[in-house]
Image (cartoon, coloured by chain):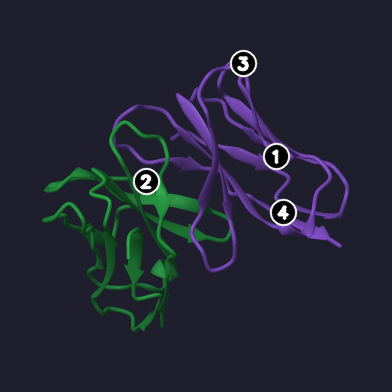
Chain colours: A purple, B green
């Protein structure tokens, strides 16, 4: 069974601070995704990274895929209260219909 | 409305009863998935389907049954509900050749 370990599990910081969330595995993934989930809703895709070493930016969010495609990070610059939510990383090992392997998530709270 | 919808949103049932959670998508996506989300475990794959009449087990299939007679519907049945099946259940769909999965809003199931 492939596992994705996310850290930290919980993070509460002040508005304007920077933060990084990590997603690590001993397995190689063909692609890795980051989702954001708000209370009472399903996860919503933020980004997909496919190539080892790939970096993608989404406004103040920067996503990086490790060179060996086993790990990823999400960095938020100047966090805002609207960034509050559950951030999930998810990996796919194959290219077929198989589902995603999810990390347990990082609960992020940005205090005004 | 276009999208992926789950019903009911909330359900309370008694131990031993059969209960069916519904999932309907309007995009004609080939792949559909059922996950359960629990504190401390994150999202875990129960069953998935590559097309109508094709289903396969995920990580935690015991106690669940699925069917997919039509592309747009993917019901999940708990044949004899147990307290350990108390959870939030998410249905998702993804088009063949695409990496993005779209999630429903979830069904919160409580087994008493």
On the image, the x and y values in percent for residue B60 come to 36, 51
Tell me if mark 4 has few (under 14), some (14-19) or many (20+) residues whose alpha carbon lies within 10 angstroms of its own: some
Circles 2 and 4, Cβ within 8 Å, touching? The answer is no
Q: Is residue B31 left or right of residue B101?
A: left
Element carrying mark 1 = loop
Query: Chain for mark 2?
Result: B
Tell me if mark 2 has few (under 14), some (14-19) or many (20+) residues whose alpha carbon lies within 10 angstroms of its own: few
Marks 1 and 2, Cα distance to the nearest angstrom? Answer: 35 Å
Image quarter of the C terminus of chain A: bottom right
Q: Are marks 3 and 2 on the same chain?
A: no
The correct choice, above or below, for A44 with respect to A63 in the image is below
Q: Nearer the viewer, residue B50 or A46?
A: A46
Query: Chain for mark 1?
Result: A
Q: Which residue is mark 3?
A: A67
Q: Is residue B72 left or right of residue B11?
A: left
Label whose residue precedes the other's in the sequence (1 or 3): 1
Label whose residue precedes the other's in the sequence (3 or 4): 3
For residue B59, the mark is 2
Marks 3 and 2, Cα distance to the nearest angstrom? Answer: 28 Å
Marks 2 and 4, Cα distance to the nearest angstrom? Answer: 31 Å
Q: Is residue B27 left or right of residue A47?
A: left
Q: Which residue is mark 1?
A: A59
Q: Comparing marks 1 and 2, which lies closer to the viewer?
A: 1
Q: Comparing marks 3 and 4, which lies closer to the viewer?
A: 4
Circles 1 and 3, Cβ within 8 Å, touching? The answer is no
On the image, the x and y values in percent for residue B75 come to 23, 63
Element carrying mark 2 = loop
Label whose residue precedes the other's in the sequence (1 or 4): 1
Q: Residue at x 58, y 30 (%)?
A: A25
Tell me if mark 3 has few (under 14), some (14-19) or many (20+) residues whose alpha carbon lies within 10 angstroms of its own: few
């Amino acid at each position: 069974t492939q596992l994705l370990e996310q850290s930290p599990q919980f993070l509460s910081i002040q508005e304007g601070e920077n933060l990084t969330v990590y997603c690590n595995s001993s397995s190689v993934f063909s692609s890795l995704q980051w989702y954001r989930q708000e209370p009472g809703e399903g996860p919503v895709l933020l980004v997909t990274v496919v190539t080892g070493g790939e970096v993608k930016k989404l406004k103040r969010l920067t996503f990086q895929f490790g060179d060996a495609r086993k790990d990823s990070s999400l960095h938020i610059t100047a966090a805002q209260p609207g960034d509050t939510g559950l951030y999930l990383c998810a990996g796919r090992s194959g290219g077929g219909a198989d589902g995603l392997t999810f990390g347990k998530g990082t609960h992020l709270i940005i205090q005004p | 409305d276009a999208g992926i919808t789950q019903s009911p949103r909330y359900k309370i049932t008694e131990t031993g009863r059969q209960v069916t959670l519904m999932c309907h998508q309007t995009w004609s996506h080939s792949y559909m998935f059922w996950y359960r989300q629990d504190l401390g475990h994150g999202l875990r794959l129960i069953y998935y389907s590559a097309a109508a009449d094709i289903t396969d087990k995920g990580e935690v299939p015991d106690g669940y049954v699925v069917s997919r007679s039509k592309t747009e519907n993917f019901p999940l049945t708990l044949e004899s509900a147990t307290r350990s099946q108390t959870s939030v259940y998410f249905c998702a769909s993804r088009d063949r050749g695409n990496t993005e999965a779209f999630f429903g809003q979830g069904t919160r199931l409580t087994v008493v």
